[in-house]
Image: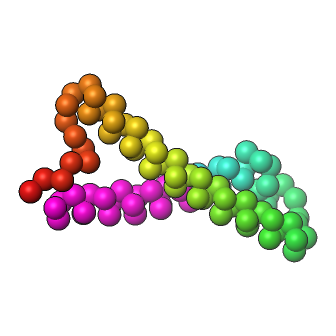
Amino acid sequence: MKKVLAREFLWFIGALVLSIPLAFLFLWMLGLTTETTIYTRDEEVFATKLFFLGYILSFIGIYVTRIVYASIKLVLTGEDDLAIEE
């Protein structure tokens, strides 16, 4: 049980860290990087909200990808990555 919790904690921390550059990539794809223009205060607030939106979507996307991978692995090999071992 401790091993499963430790693995989940590491996945959680890894997803949090990996979501930061993915959120910046999200803003870059929208053309809202600070190197292109100078923003007013309202535009900065809007860009910050979009950054957090991209961060949350990236975090959810990482976890969904992980669950899909574990499901495919379970179906193909019979090895359960998410199983609780005692």
Q: Residue at point 47% right, 61% down? A: 16
Q: Position of residue 59 (x, y in %)?
A: 52, 55
Which residue is pictured at 77% across the width and 63% down the height? 47
Please tell me how many numbered marks the rendered image carries: 0
Q: Residue at x 26, y 57 (%)?
A: 7
Left or right, 85 with reference to 44: left
Say which quadrant the N terminus sits in.
bottom left
Residue 16 located within the stretch drawn in magenta: yes
Q: Is residue 49 left or right of 78 when viewed as pictured?
A: right
40 or 58, which is in the foreground?
58
Q: Is residue 34 magenta?
A: no
Q: Which residues are magenta?
A: 1-20
In the drawing, does residue 54 fall left or right of residue 82? right
How far from the left and from the top, in percent, is residue 13? 40, 63
Residue 48 vertical position relative to residue 57 in the rendered view, above or below? below
Mainly helix, strand or loop, the magenta region?
helix
Q: Measuring from the top left, give residue 44's x and y in whole percent.
A: 81, 69
The one nearer the camera, 75 or 31, is 75
Q: Residue furthest right?
A: 40
Residue drawn at (79%, 55%) of the image: 32
Q: Nearer the viewer, residue 20 or 69?
A: 69
Q: How is the image coloured?
A: rainbow
In the displayed image of the protein, which residue is found farthest to the left? Answer: 86
Q: Position of residue 19 (x, y in %)?
A: 53, 56
Quarter occupied by the C terminus: bottom left
Residue found at the very far bottom of the displayed protein: 41
**Is 21 above or below relative to 77?**
below
